[in-house]
Amino acid sequence: VLDWMLPGLSGIELCRRIRRADATRGVPILMLTARGEESDRVRGLSTGADDYVVKPFSVPEMIARVKALLRRASPDRIADVLRAGDITLDRNAHRVMRREREVRMGPTEFRLLSFFMENVGRVLSRQQLLDGVWGRDAFIDGRTVDVHVGRLRKALVRGNDRDPIRTVRGAGYVFEGAVG
């Protein structure tokens, strides 16, 4: 969500920069601004905004527009095959491989690994894992995450394999990938 009138740099210029950079080119942009003239809306959309909302706005409509943008952006953003170190996850085949060996796990552990692999190197709290794997509307205790992380570790670590999941005391878990 980007406002046209930002301090120091216009939202139009920031939108232009976001669209030029390879790393951010695909990020959905919704312009939210008080500038409601037709020429302003055309300029915002022409510069690269995916949607344009004029203040004052309806909160439910704004939420619906953001969700629609994220839905449209997700298929391009999420790869079918994820790789981290010696672990490969294929979403279409619902299959996980580690060092050329298939790793068997339940559907919840598969979704948990998928979420971890989308966020390699990022510390994820129990709440972030609950929201990302079970959904925001799930009524599940945070300790449930610990149980499923334990099951995932058990499935991934065989013999001398390094545990790709590190517990960060007081913060959550970080997936570091796996090599060695």
Image (cartoon, rainbow, N blue to C red):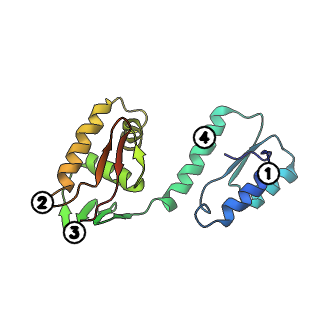
| Label located before the other in sequence (4 or 2) | 4
Q: Residue 169 placed where, x, y %?
A: 33, 38
Q: Residue 105 placed where, x, y %?
A: 20, 52
Label 1 near label 4: C-beta < 8 Å?
Answer: no
Q: CA distance from mark 2 to mark 1?
A: 56 Å
Q: Amino acid at mark 2?
A: Gly
Residue matched to label 1 = 10
* 175 lies left or right of 154: right
State which mark lies toward you, 4 or 3.
3
Q: Amino acid at mark 4?
A: Ala
Helix, strand or loop under label 4: helix
Which quadrant, please, contains the C terminus?
bottom left
Q: Which mark is residue 99?
A: 3
Above or below: residue 44 compared with residue 57: below
Residue matched to label 4 = 64
Q: CA distance from mark 2 to mark 3?
A: 12 Å
Badge 1 crowding class, 10 Å Cα cut-off, few under 14, some 14 to 19, many 20 or more, is some
Q: Amino acid at mark 3?
A: Arg
Which quadrant, please, contains the N terminus?
top right
Q: Which mark is residue 159?
A: 2
Helix, strand or loop under label 2: loop
Q: CA distance from mark 4 to mark 2?
A: 48 Å
Q: Amino acid at mark 1?
A: Ser
Q: Which mark is residue 82?
A: none
Helix, strand or loop under label 1: loop
